[in-house]
Image (spheres, rainbow, N blue to C red):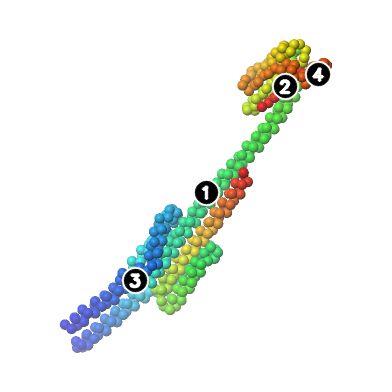
């Protein structure tokens, strides 16, 4: 009977010894801080997006506190947990920065591409402008030689070359407009000269239209004898005054 | 063996068993794997230039590893295990901090270069 009594006493003591080791430990402040830090990180959208796995690792570390048998264990778990949370935050920030760099690179490439296109456009426009200037010079030169049958608006044979050039020019440079101004010398009445100069300008305009140039791009005017560029006394001067002037816009 | 002797023996065996059980519960093997992992993590952090970007964390990880090794020598394996785990976690933090530092530097350089390119285009 005595043995049984002692046995009954010893067994609970042994159980109690183990039970103390697993007793519910009070969480140290560092552990509470780690739990708080976890909540903050878990609510951070950047952490959620880029380092959810690492945060889960920290969560598991903190959860392992249920098996802690000493205050030292809990403190260590708190340290490791908060360090892992800190790691998650840094990892997320690093990944965010990398993504930002990638986005910036794309932006830079787009800018460079746009700049190149702008440069190419500018170069093309410059080239076109040079070509237009060159063509305009040739047309003006050709129109300097243009002649009409005296007193009529009929072009003398061979005058068509300048008009062909002008038609070609108008077809190539679609934005350009042309003004054809007819001038005469002072022979005859000023009224008839004005009429004749207009008819001559219009006859050129009509040829251009038959060659496909839109009439809206052509202005034909007749100034008669009102704008001489040489004296009308000599035949050479009068020849200079009978002219067609072309201006481009 | 009379009853008294038998009782005394039972008490002795019980105490011995209890003490042994308690010892077995606390006694663990030296945390070799955890120490090796901490060492590898520190090495990786150093390779990521943690000396420049996370010097304090790297130093802390090294100290904890050193302490862990010292506790193993004194047969305090549980303490050594805790320290080895803490060392590895700290080294991983040093890695993340280094990566973050470098990524942020790259981003600011990228922003600077974009700013220059923008000013050239204007």
SS state under label 4: loop
Which residue: 44% across, 78% down? B73
Q: Are marks 2 and 3 in contact (CB under 8 Å)?
A: no
Q: CA distance from mark 1 to mark 4?
A: 73 Å
Between marks 4 and 2, how big is the CA–CA gap?
18 Å
Residue shown at the point (18%, 83%) measured from the top left: A2
- Point 24% across, 76% down: residue: A12
Label 3 is found on which chain of the structure? Answer: A
Mark 1 or mark 4, which has the lower sequence index? 1
Q: Position of residue A30 (x, y in %)?
A: 40, 67
SS of the residue at dot 2?
Answer: strand
What residue sits right under mark 4 in the picture? A231
In three-dimensional space, the C-alpha distance between marks 1 and 2, rounded to whole angstroms, equals 58 Å
- First in sequence: mark 4 or mark 2? 4
Structural distance between the alpha carbons of marks 2 and 3:
107 Å
Q: Do callouts 2 and 3 point to residues on the same chain?
A: yes
Q: Earlier in the sequence, mark 1 or mark 3?
A: 3
Q: Is residue B41 above or below residue A169?
A: below
**In the image: residue A42, left or right of residue A4:** right
Subunit that carries the residue with mark 1: A
SS for tag 1?
A: helix
Q: Nearer the viewer, mark 1 or mark 4?
A: 4
Q: CA distance from mark 4 to mark 3?
A: 122 Å
Label at residue A103:
1
In the drawing, does residue A39 fall left or right of residue A139?
left
Residue linked to disc 3: A69
The residue to which callout 2 is attached is A245
Same chain shared by disc 4 and disc 3? yes
Asked if residue A35 lies left or right of residue A196, the reply is left
């Amino acid at each position: 009977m005595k043995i049984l009594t002692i046995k009954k006493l010893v067994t609970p003591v042994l159980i109690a010894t183990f039970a103390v080791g697993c007793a519910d430990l009070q969480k140290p402040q560092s552990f509470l801080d780690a739990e708080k830090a976890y909540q903050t990180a878990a609510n951070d959208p950047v952490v959620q997006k880029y380092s959810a796995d690492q945060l889960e690792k920290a969560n598991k570390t903190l959860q392992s506190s249920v098996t802690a048998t000493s205050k030292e264990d809990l403190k260590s778990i708190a340290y490791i947990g908060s360090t892992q949370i800190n790691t998650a935050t840094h990892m997320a920030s690093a990944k965010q920065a990398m993504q930002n760099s990638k986005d910036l690179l794309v932006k830079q490439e787009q800018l460079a591409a746009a700049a190149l296109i702008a440069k190419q456009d500018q170069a093309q426009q410059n080239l076109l402008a040079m070509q237009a200037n060159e063509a305009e010079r040739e047309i003006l030169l050709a129109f300097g030689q243009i002649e009409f049958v005296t007193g009529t608006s009929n072009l003398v044979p061979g005058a068509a070359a300048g008009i062909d050039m002008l038609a070609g020019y108008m077809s190539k440079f679609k934005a350009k407009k042309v003004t054809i101004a007819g001038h005469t010398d002072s022979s005859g009445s000023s009224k008839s000269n004005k009429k004749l100069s207009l008819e001559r300008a219009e006859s050129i305009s009509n040829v251009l239209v038959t060659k496909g140039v839109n009439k809206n791009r052509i202005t034909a005017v007749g100034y008669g004898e009102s704008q001489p560029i040489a004296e009308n006394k000599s035949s050479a001067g009068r020849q200079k005054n009978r002219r067609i002037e072309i201006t481009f816009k | 063996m009379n009853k008294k002797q038998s009782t005394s023996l039972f008490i002795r065996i019980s105490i011995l068993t209890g003490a042994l059980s308690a010892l077995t519960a606390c006694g663990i093997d030296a945390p070799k794997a955890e120490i090796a992992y901490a060492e590898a993590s520190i090495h990786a952090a150093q390779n990521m230039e943690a000396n420049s970007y996370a010097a304090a964390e790297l130093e802390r990880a090294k100290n904890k590893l050193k302490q862990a090794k010292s506790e193993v020598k004194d047969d305090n394996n549980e303490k050594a295990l805790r320290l080895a785990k803490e060392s590895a976690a700290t080294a991983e933090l040093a890695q993340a901090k280094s990566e973050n530092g470098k990524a942020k530097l790259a981003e600011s350089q990228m922003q600077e270069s974009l700013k220059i390119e923008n000013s050239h285009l204007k």
